[in-house]
Amino acid sequence: MRHLIDPMDLSVEEIDKILNLADDIIANPVKYQDACAHKKLATLFFEPSTRTRLSFEAAMMELGGNVLGFSSADSSSATKGESVSDTVKVVSCYADIIAMRHPKEGAPCLAAMKSDAPIINAGDGGHNHPTQTLTDLLTIRREKGRLDNLTIGCCGDLKFGRTVHSLIKAMSRYANIHFIMISPEELEIPEYLKQEVFEQGGLDYEQVRTIDEVIDRLDVLYMTRVQRERFFNEADYVRLKDTYILNMKKLKKAKKDLSILHPLPRVNEISVDVDNDPRACYFRQALNGKYVRMALILTMLGIDR
Ligand code: NCD
């Protein structure tokens, strides 16, 4: 039994297969509509979510399967003091596969040790978010036609933003990728990732403080929200929250084929006037999230069509 806890749990070949399967699902949805008949997905969300949970549930429904679960820790026995391990041990008797989100880094990994069903990490604290990364890879591949030879700007909260942490790990395995990390000094990518991914991993990167100084060089701009819930004090959040606001004026110098991604939810960091620009991919990206999760569920349950 395999779990998906970290994006590096999947090889490049496995990721390729999942993305190819997602492309096929998009092209031939009817072929897959009963593929998960009589299978159940449990979504255990100890932390808020809109896209991730609902796209997982929609994915399982479109595969003809069923879903059960909870959308907040408040409505689970966590409020009675039950451990994550016990919760998962029990839920794995009821479901064939489990998607789990938790505010504590490492919680899904711990859960996987006890589970009798495959666990998918749907976000653990400021750590990883591998299914968002699959969504991002599918989006980049569909928009740009490739996953190599790209200059990718990541902008915003690179310290707490788990989607960026997982994305840089996954992208480190493709050829000729250059990352430009755009953040205030206080929200730079954590030191352990600088070491692991950029320095030891040999991934090319630079750090800058403004979008303006690099926008003309980017193939992909990955915007992120400042992660309010992970700040130690509100004053720091208020000071940093509007550091970057992407608008049409800022895009003047950008390439004509730039792809603007955002895992969403957006707060202020992309002005709504950008939404109508063809380079804005974030709503297509959210839709891709459903298809890639369909592909992932099929793959992890070993269902072949
Ligand atoms: C992201 C997350 O939960 O990390 N959202 C998502 O899953 N699409 C990004 C965020 O919350 O800022």
Image (tube, rainbow, N blue to C red):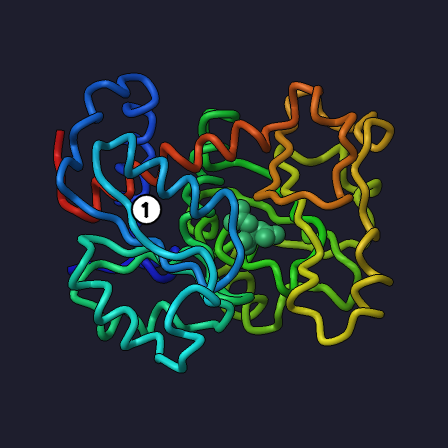
Q: From what the image shows, is residue 107 above or below residue 134?
A: below
Measured as percent of width and height from the top left, residue 217 is found at: 71, 35
Measured as percent of width and height from the top left, residue 120 is found at: 32, 56
Q: Quadrant of residue 194?
A: bottom right
Residue 52 falls left or right of residue 297 = right
Residue 204 showing in the rendered view:
no
Residue, x 28% and y 60% (percent of image)?
Answer: 119
Residue, x 71% and y 25% (percent of image)?
Answer: 255
Residue 5 falls left or right of residue 262 = left
Q: Give the residue furthest to the bottom.
A: 81
Residue 36 falls left or right of residue 119 = left
Q: Nearer the viewer, residue 182 or 101?
A: 101
User: The N terminus is located in which quarter?
Assistant: bottom left
Within 8 Å of ligand 1, the CB of disc 1? no
User: The C terminus is located in which quarter?
Assistant: top left
Measured as percent of width and height from the top left, residue 278 is found at: 65, 19
Measured as percent of width and height from the top left, residue 154 is found at: 65, 48
Residue type for callout 1: Val
Q: Nearer the viewer, residue 166 or 145?
A: 166
Residue, x 86% and y 62% (percent of image)?
Answer: 239
Q: Quadrant of residue 274?
A: top right
Residue beneath disc 1: 12
Residue 268 showing in the rendered view:
yes
Q: Quadrant of residue 265?
A: top right
- Mark 1, secondary structure of its residue: helix
Q: From what the image shows, is residue 10 above or below residue 107?
A: above
Q: Nearer the viewer, residue 235 or 144?
A: 235
Q: Residues within 10 Å of mark 1 (few under 14, many from 20)?
A: some
